Image (spheres, rainbow, N blue to C red):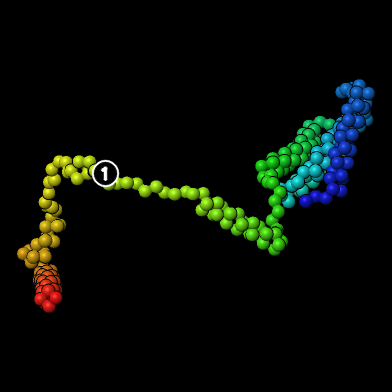
Amino acid sequence: MKSPSWYYLASLVFLAGLLLSVTGIAFSIYVNLSRISEPGEIRLAFGLIGAGLAITLAGLNMMIRFRSEYSVYVVIAGFLLSLAAIAGFISIFPDLWYYPNVSYVVAAYTLGIALLVGNSFANVVLNLIEKKPVMREEFSPEEIEREVERVIDESMRRIIEFSDSGLRFRDVDTAGFRPSRSFGERRGETKVVGDSVPEVEALRLLKTGSIEVEDKEIETDSKLLKDVISREEGRKKSFKGFKGFGFLRRWKHG
């Protein structure tokens, strides 16, 4: 952040440039400046106005908080270009004031003023967009402890107020509730459609061992699969019979 003395200096530069511009305008009015005026009068008038405008914009840029470090170089470049153009005008007018010298001077001065105006405008807009309220980011341990205690006390107070509010949930009597006919009614007919997908039929035949294939390895694997499924089903039946026998023994001794 810039110090107050820097803002005082920027204000003085701004006022100096403004004073130079006003002086140049006043001098032009005083001598009735025109294209047939003395070359010295023209050089002095335009030199004061041009330099005053560049200095005014430089002071204005000094007051603005830059969002990038490159803004300083932009201001310096624009200010130097403007002063160089003014110096070039004073040195070549009127003897060498013709094309292409005129284009060089005008282009340099225009570019310098554009840099000063553009930099100030861009930084002002960015400062307005990114402007945020000033907030404290550092807290002492005592402040943190007091804030925690305050939040806990507030929470406990709300819990106590809620428990003493007398809020109760009313029991709903469902003795006379009778569901409608649609609750247990089934409308329409249910049709069971057999699955006739070829792949499913092939799997069923493979499981029963009734499918015939020319590949011996597949035929062998099918028989092994059938034996495994048969043993598994026999094991399940034996297990169910064992459970039934155990239940019968407990019933007789029970």
Q: Residue 203 is drawn in which quadrant?
A: bottom left
Of residues 195 and 45, the one nearer the viewer is 195
Q: Residue at x 24, y 43 (%)?
A: 178
> Can you say which quadrant of the picture contains the C terminus?
bottom left
Q: Is residue 103 left or right of residue 183?
A: right
Q: Residue at x 41, y 49 (%)?
A: 169
Q: Residues within 10 Å of mark 1 (few under 14, many from 20)?
A: few
Q: Is residue 155 above or below residue 178?
A: below
Residue 187, given in percent of the width and then of the height, sits at 16, 41
Of residues 243 and 129, the one nearer the viewer is 243
Q: Residue 245 is drawn in which quadrant?
A: bottom left
Q: Is residue 2 left or right of residue 162?
A: right
Q: How many marks?
A: 1
Secondary structure at numbered mark 1: loop
Residue 149, given in percent of the width and then of the height, sits at 64, 59
The amino acid on which the numbered mark 1 sits, given as a three-letter code, is Gly
Residue 95, given in percent of the width and then of the height, sits at 88, 32
Q: Disc 1 marks which residue?
A: 176
Residue 238: in sight, yes or no? no
Q: Is residue 42 left or right of residue 156?
A: right
Q: Is residue 64 left or right of residue 40?
A: left
Q: Residue at x 64, y 56 (%)?
A: 150
Q: Residue 116 is drawn in which quadrant?
A: top right
Q: Residue at x 26, y 44 (%)?
A: 176
Residue 135: in sight, yes or no? yes
